[in-house]
Amino acid sequence: MSIFSSIKNAIFGRPAEAAPAPEAAAIPMAEAAPAAPAAAVDVAAVLSGMAGADGLNWRSSVVDLMKLVGLDASYENRKELAHELGNADYSGSAEDNIMLQKQVMKALADNGGMVPAELMD
């Protein structure tokens, strides 16, 4: 599993296990209800509510964000995350970490999360 997927799953919840499909004859098409759209996840609220959030600066630190969701925030993992998000020039500098944090928040928003604009700017 990718590092971004691990972050996304920690915030959005893991995808539900696929239930076996009912037999076609058991549910006539006329009675089948359309799937309801998934509710958007308030990323900041979920992260703020996680144990340990008050002691970490996850809003601006990708290292603290990774720690909060239970991931190893080593340079190697941050570099892999940067590559997943399209940043092949990641060096681990403070500027790179700030940019990576914003890229993660933007990617969460692109994947259906509600992310405050100040976390992506």
Image: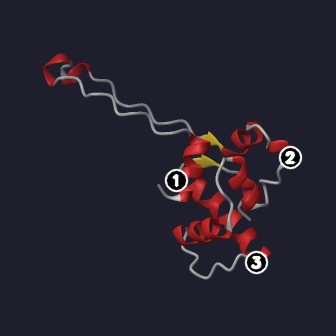
> x and y percent of residue 14 in the render?
51, 39
Q: Amino acid at mark 1?
A: Ser
Distance, label 3 to label 2, CA atoms, is: 22 Å
Q: Are marks 2 and 1 in contact (CB under 8 Å)?
A: no
Q: Quadrant of residue 100?
A: bottom right
Q: Would you name the residue on which mark 2 appears?
A: 55
> x and y percent of residue 55 in the render?
86, 46
Query: Callout 1: helix, strand or loop?
Result: helix
Sooner in the amino-acid sequence: mark 2 or mark 1: 1
Q: Nearer the viewer, residue 91 or 106?
A: 91
Point out the image quarter for the C terminus: bottom right
Query: Callout 2: helix, strand or loop?
Result: helix
**From what the image shows, is residue 44 above or below residue 103?**
above
Q: Nearer the viewer, residue 84 or 79?
A: 79
Mark 1 nearby-residue class (10 Å; few <14, some 14–19, many ≥20): some
Sooner in the amino-acid sequence: mark 3 or mark 1: 1
Distance, label 3 to label 1, CA atoms, is: 23 Å
Q: Are marks 3 and 1 in contact (CB under 8 Å)?
A: no
Disc sitting over residue 93 in the figure:
3
Disc sitting over residue 90 in the figure:
none
Q: Would you name the residue on which mark 1 appears?
A: 5
> x and y percent of residue 115 in the render?
68, 51
> x and y percent of residue 78 in the render?
64, 67
Q: Quadrant of residue 46?
A: top right
**Residue at (47% x, 54% y) in the render:** 1
Left or right for 83, reference 46? left
Q: Amino acid at mark 3?
A: Ser
- As drawn, which residue projects farthest toward the left? 25
